Image (cartoon, helix red, strand yellow):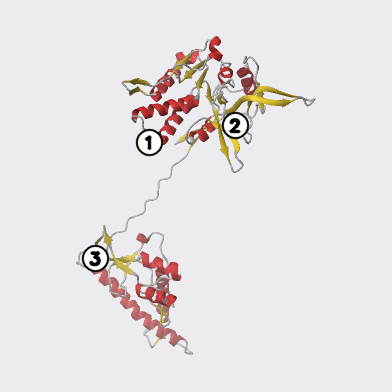
Amino acid sequence: MPFDVEMTGAGDYSRQIKMAICGQAGAGKTLISSTAPNPIYIFFREQPRIMSIADRFMPHIKVLPEVEDGKLKVPVEDKMHEILDYLRTEEAQELYDTVVIDTGDELQRALKEGKKLRNRGAWHIQDWGWLSDVYYSIVNAFIDLPMNVIVLYHLKNTQEGDDGQIIKELALQGATKDDAPGWFDIVGVLSAFESVDEKGRKSASRGFLTEPTPRYGWVKDHSGKLPNIYQVTDDFVGDFDVLHDMIYGGVEIASEHETLATVTVEITEPTVVEEHPGVPTPEEVEEKKQERSDKVDIKEKIEAAREAKQVENVEEDVPSTGVPLDDVVEIAAEIVAEDEAANVVPETPAETMTMLDDEEGNDGAVPAALPHCEADVDGEPCGAIPMTQQFEDGVPVVGDDGEPVLVVDETLVELGQVRFRKVLCKKHLGEARKAAKK
């Protein structure tokens, strides 16, 4: 699937600002947002506190839950999505350059109250997740609009740590108060700050804090171009224009994206592992058993040949076995290779199957690399395969011959390896446990 590698530019922001302005009631949040170009406000009260901008004649929308006979008729989230649909139209974008949500915490409260109305006054624990998801989707849908977006927030005090240090947080409920600052490019606090001039004289002035402090750890300025405290005018005139010019002034932004390259990645088809041909027929089982029996006989002859080879002036044909020495060496190499393969667990057990007889007389198709008991019996490994009856849904599995189907006892193998660092059959695992208790 192809994808483009692009340069950042107007396609990302078009000189827009996505910011959160936070502060106590009366700090001037609504006033400073009114200095943005052609704003439209969204309020969540029947009588919003807009005296500060009453003489600025600002267009606004009041979003309230519609209730009829005590029941919620139109929830706030539906109204917010209707506003979003309107602001995406060409008509709205010709009229407005900025949308202001006043305030983000009142929006959350309105969503919560609407949910409680649907729950007949109750608030359930699972409703917190609903509130977080709906609030996130609405605010971020506004942030994605092709215009300046300003969300105002009240602040609340929180006591933290053993020393009782007071920190400031957004007046949101739940985990959203920690998540919301991450949604914006600029998150600042509007307040009165003390400054000191060159002669050491102190004075208080209103400013917009853009650098995090111990009390305001969530404040940020992604542009990196604003001062730590951006000074606000006394009459709140032109403040947004000056801030905007600090960020974008003198920066040449392309009218559209520059595509550096279009990349097409070839998707490699996954490797298909061939399925195992199936379970051998009884005739194949018997043939394999006979083959192994023959090799055992040859192995005994090989041992005799090895002893004969130690005699001086050994002939090419070993009289004690009647097997040519070259054949003896070839068969010996084959058996050694088989023995080594039997002790290696293949990456995909289904890749190699062979017929084996365990010491309990269980014939059938089993993986070639089965775990064998490593307990010492008279100087030789036990070699028994730890087996157990196979169950499906608690019911024993029976083969076509009516006999129980046996499989490797993985639990038994794991117990032995964890406890004694080697594979043990049931008998020798029990003996090893008894010995360990003594």
Residues under numbered marks 3 and 2 in contact, where contact means CB atoms less than 8 Å apart: no
Q: Residues within 10 Å of mark 2 (few under 14, many from 20)?
A: many
- Tell me the kind of residue under disc 3: Thr
Q: Which residue is mark 2?
A: 219
Label 3 residue SS: loop
Q: Which residue is mark 3?
A: 281
Answer with the quarter of the image where residue 426 lies: bottom left
- Residue 340 against residue 84 in the figure, above or below: below
Q: Which residue is mark 1?
A: 124
- Residue 314 against residue 136 in the figure, above or below: below
Whole-Å distance between the Cαs marked 3 and 2? 75 Å
- Residue 158 against residue 26 in the figure, above or below: below
Q: Which mark is residue 113?
A: none
Residue nearer the viewer, 239 or 360? 239
Mark closer to the observer (1, 2): 1
Whole-Å distance between the Cαs marked 3 and 1? 63 Å
Say left or right for 43 vs 237.
left
Whole-Å distance between the Cαs marked 1 and 2? 32 Å
Q: Residues within 10 Å of mark 3 (few under 14, many from 20)?
A: few
